[in-house]
Image: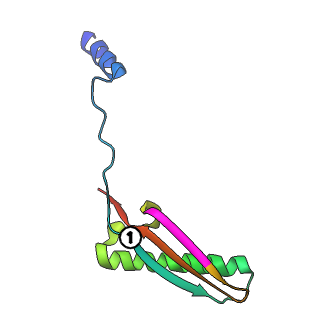
């Protein structure tokens, strides 16, 4: 009982180290571009161009750095730039691919 109480007190005071946070390793930034001309709303064209650019980014990253780095949601310093005309949208995405080790 005494050991259990001492352990609880030590944990409360922070004397026992918590498990280390996940280490994240990032690579140099990678860019990918896509264009959409679907016959839909301007927003739909831009969304399609952005999603396709992210898919290209993931494929390119996987080919260069391996499957652990391919996830857009883990990337850092994300940048999305879209432009175009009423009939066409193009988007460029840039981010540093990261892997949780």
- Residue 30's image quarter? bottom left
Against 99, residue 7 (above or below) is above
Residue at point 38%, 67% (across, down): 97
Q: Nearer the viewer, residue 5 or 90?
A: 90
Observer-nearest residue: 85 or 5?
A: 85
- Which residue lies most toward the left here? 3
Q: Quadrant of residue 71?
A: bottom left
Q: Is residue 71 left or right of residue 18?
A: right
- The residue that mark 1 highlights is 29
Numbered marks: total = 1
Q: Which residues are magenta?
A: 76-82
Q: Determine whether the residue tagged by mark 1 lies in a helix, strand or loop.
A: loop
Number of residues whose C-alpha sits closer than 10 Å to that of mark 1, classed few (under 14), some (14–19) or many (20 or more): some
Look at the image and tell me in which quarter the C terminus lies: bottom left
Residue drawn at x 73%, y 84% is: 40
Which of the 4 image quadrants contains residue 27?
bottom left
The percent coordinates of residue 67 (x first, y second) are 33, 71
User: Please, which colouring scheme is shown?
Assistant: rainbow
Q: Nearer the viewer, residue 1 or 26?
A: 26
Quarter of the image with the N terminus in it: top left
Does 79 lie within the magenta span? yes
């Amino acid at each position: 009982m005494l050991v259990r109480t001492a352990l609880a007190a030590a944990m409360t005071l922070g004397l026992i180290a918590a498990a280390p946070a996940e280490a994240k390793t990032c690579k140099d930034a990678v860019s990918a571009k896509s264009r959409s001309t679907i016959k839909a709303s301007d927003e739909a064209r831009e969304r399609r161009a952005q999603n396709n650019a992210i898919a290209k980014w993931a494929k390119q990253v996987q080919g260069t750095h391996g499957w652990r780095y391919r996830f857009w949601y883990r990337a850092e310093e994300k940048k999305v730039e879209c432009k175009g005309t009423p009939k066409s949208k193009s988007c460029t995405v840039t981010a540093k691919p990261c892997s949780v080790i």
